[in-house]
Image (tube, grey):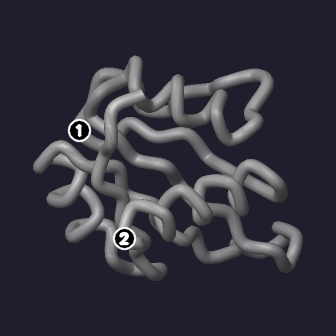
Amino acid sequence: MPQVDRKVFGPGRLPEALDFADGGGQALLYVEPEDGWPRASAISLIDQDAERLEATARRCGVQKIDIRQQGTRGQYVLLWSKPKWAALRLAREAVA
């Protein structure tokens, strides 16, 4: 897989994450837990390239890929647990 720029964004930084993805990168946006959600937060992996989004999700260990808002500017895959940590490692490697 060709090298892709990845960047992590904290909760509430959706506009910046979308702008980064518009520029050809993959944005990892922390999602604030809602009432009733487990304490552990999830991240949204945002990418305008659906094929690359799916490939990255698979690389992170997601078995069943559900691209949400597919075909829109903000299409994403929600990552929890091991896939979340794998995506964060990929982002860290991208800046190393």
Task: Name the kind of residue labelled 2 in the image.
Answer: Val
Q: Are marks 2 and 1 in contact (CB under 8 Å)?
A: no
The numbered mark at residue 24 is: none
Residue that mark 1 sits on: 73
Task: Name the kind of residue labelled 1 in the image.
Answer: Arg
Image position, residue 9 (x, y; %): 40, 75
Indicate left or right for 79 with 30 as reference: right
Sequence-first disc among 2 and 1: 1
Indicate left or right for 94 with 60 as reference: left
Indicate left or right for 94 with 17 as reference: right
Image position, residue 68 (x, y; %): 51, 32
Residue for point 38% across, 36% down: 75
Q: Which residue ends up furthest to the front in the rendered image?
A: 96
Image position, residue 10 (x, y; %): 45, 81
Measured Cα–Cα span from mark 2 to mark 1: 24 Å
Answer above or below: position of 2 versus 93.
above
Which of the two residues, 26 or 76, is positioned nearer the viewer here? 26
Label 2 SS: helix
Residue for point 42% across, 28% down: 1
Residue 41, quarter of picture: bottom right
Image position, residue 56 (x, y; %): 53, 35
Which of the two residues, 38 or 10, is positioned nearer the viewer here? 10
Residue that mark 2 sits on: 95
Residue for point 29% across, 63% down: 17
Which of the two residues, 52 or 30, is positioned nearer the viewer here? 52
Q: Quadrant of the C terminus?
A: bottom left
Label 1 SS: loop
Which of the two residues, 95 or 8, is positioned nearer the viewer here? 95
